[in-house]
Amino acid sequence: MNDDPYAVRRRGLMFVLSSPSGAGKTTISREILAQDEAITMSVSATTRPKRPGERDGVDYEFMDVTSFNLMVNRREFLEYAKVFDNYYGTPAAPVEALLAQGRDVLFDIDWQGTQQVAEQARDDLVSVFILPPSMRELERRLTTRAQDSARVVASRMAKASDEMTHYAEYDYIIINNNVEDSVAEAHAILKAERLRRDRQIGLGEFVKGLRQGG
Ligand code: 5GP
């Protein structure tokens, strides 16, 4: 934190990336996190089984339905939703702590969660929807990922076309033809949104200082 009372500070923003499974959102999120120190990933809670290679507390907080419901009842989620056959939710406390420190938070949540965040904190939300270049490519990515059974892949393909209808609820759309370009586009959105006048606190005093020759 800067000690200068007239310094321009910034409110943290909530950067939401949504897409149908397999459209490349996970890779894009990882790259943004690697390239940008001012943004932190929100770790969701989920009742779905852990996939190979996933780590508890890093990829998700894996929990049973009873623990999840307890958090719902205690109103500990910023948002939560049933996606496919499992529950997913964003624990509110870590997000609030980060935003209060002026840090940005990256969310990989679905359209239902994005709607809930928009209802609660529209001014702090920047939402991006990622589309695959084609359904054929989406299927290829889901199949080569091979983390899920054929039945799950088929069900995700079927749901993907429904999920895509929600593109119109998002601020920005990226068509993921090429991961490198998509990362650069997502990062450009983040950088521009940080500069919005209403996110910068203390501008009036800063400009007053400038005009006084400071
Ligand atoms: P996966 O099981 O493939 O990790 O995620 C499935 C879907 O759940 C993805 O579309 C992802 O964006 C969504 N998701 C993950 N965490 C959350 C969350 O905390 N809230 C909501 N609403 N969706 C989530």
Image (cartoon, rainbow, N blue to C red):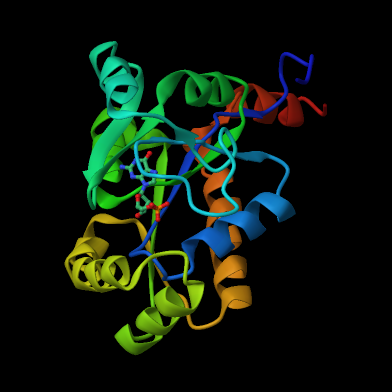
Quarter of the view holding residue 29:
bottom right
Q: Quadrant of the N terminus?
A: top right
Which of 123 and 55 lies nearest the eye of the viewer? 55
Q: Which residue is at a point 37% across and 79% down the rendered structure image?
A: 138
Q: 174 left or right of 64? A: right
x, y percentage for residue 194? 57, 44
Quarter of the view holding residue 72:
top left
Q: Which residue is at a point 32% across and 73% down the rendered structure image?
A: 150
Q: 32 left or right of 12? A: right
x, y percentage for residue 36? 70, 49
Q: Which residue is at a point 60% across and 59% down the rendered structure image?
A: 187
Q: Is residue 9 above or below residue 52?
A: above
x, y percentage for residue 155? 22, 67
Q: Is residue 8 above or below residue 147?
A: above
Q: 209 left or right of 20? A: right
Q: 84 left or right of 28? A: left
Quarter of the view holding residue 77:
top left
Q: Quadrant of the C terminus?
A: top right
How many badges with numbers are in the image? 0
Q: Which residue is at a point 48% across and 68% down the rendered structure image?
A: 24
